[in-house]
Amino acid sequence: MTTLSTTLAKRLEDPRLFRQYAYVNGKWTHGEGGREEAVYDPATNEAIGHIPLLEAEQITAAVDAAEAAFVHWRALRADERCERLLAWYDLIQANREDLATIMTLEQGKPLPDARGEVEYGASFVRLFAEEGKRTYGETIPSHIPNASLGTIKEPVGIAAMITPWNFPLAMITRKAAAALAAGCPVIVKPAKRNAVLGAGAGRTC
């Protein structure tokens, strides 16, 4: 795995935000055998980083890890999940300039637009953090005398997500925040062009 490019090293306040690994089961990991693919700045054609290419066995392990995490995550109260998502929101806001810079360098979006997408993406995290506390059921009129019917909403399992190249941050937060707020762990596969900012070749939360 290559080191941080000179361009990024000069422009990022916190270089730790730039990751060239997949995040699986709480750890940053690389592909077996060192297989990777370069990510290029479309403006200069400079390789700004590399992403790991995970093997089938590693993808299966990521699914297994997400399944194991589901037991704990679904058991959290809605307000507890809300607190964790709001912490994510705060981290995005605290690092919004670096995130916008990475997005521009890897995807080509003008910097003002990238800044706007960071705000846009963060808004989904805050929205679903709060909406997760209002996952109400329904009361249904019954056809049986002296009886009542109702529904409750429960998390059902892992959410697998594939995101597009043109909104690399916002489309991840829009999907992942909703699933996490509902109690479902996620696996994200971003477009290759956005893999450094998004999630490497595979990520689970």
Image (cartoon, rainbow, N blue to C red):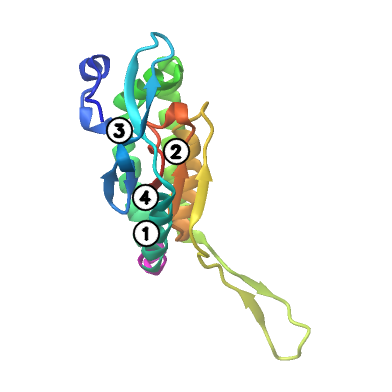
Quick one: SS at disc 3? Answer: loop
Question: Can you identify the residue that label 4 sits on?
Answer: 85
Q: Could you tell me the amino acid type at mark 3?
A: Gln
- Classify 10 Å Cα crowding around label 1: few (below 14), some (14-19), many (20 and above): some
Q: Could you tell me the amino acid type at mark 1?
A: Ala
Question: Can you identify the residue that label 1 sits on?
Answer: 65
Q: CA distance from mark 4 to mark 1?
A: 20 Å
- From which residue to which does the magenta span run? 72-79
Marked residue nearer the N-terminal end (4 or 1): 1
Q: Could you tell me the amino acid type at mark 2?
A: Ser
Question: Can you identify the residue that label 3 sits on?
Answer: 20
Q: Which mark is residue 123?
A: 2
Which residue is located at x 35 percent, y 13 percent? 46
> In front here: 82 or 13?
13
Q: Tell how many labels.
A: 4
Q: CA distance from mark 3 to mark 4?
A: 24 Å
Marked residue nearer the N-terminal end (3 or 1): 3
Q: Position of residue 126 (x, y in %)?
A: 42, 44
Q: CA distance from mark 2 to mark 1?
A: 28 Å
Q: State which quadrant residue 90 falls in.
A: top left
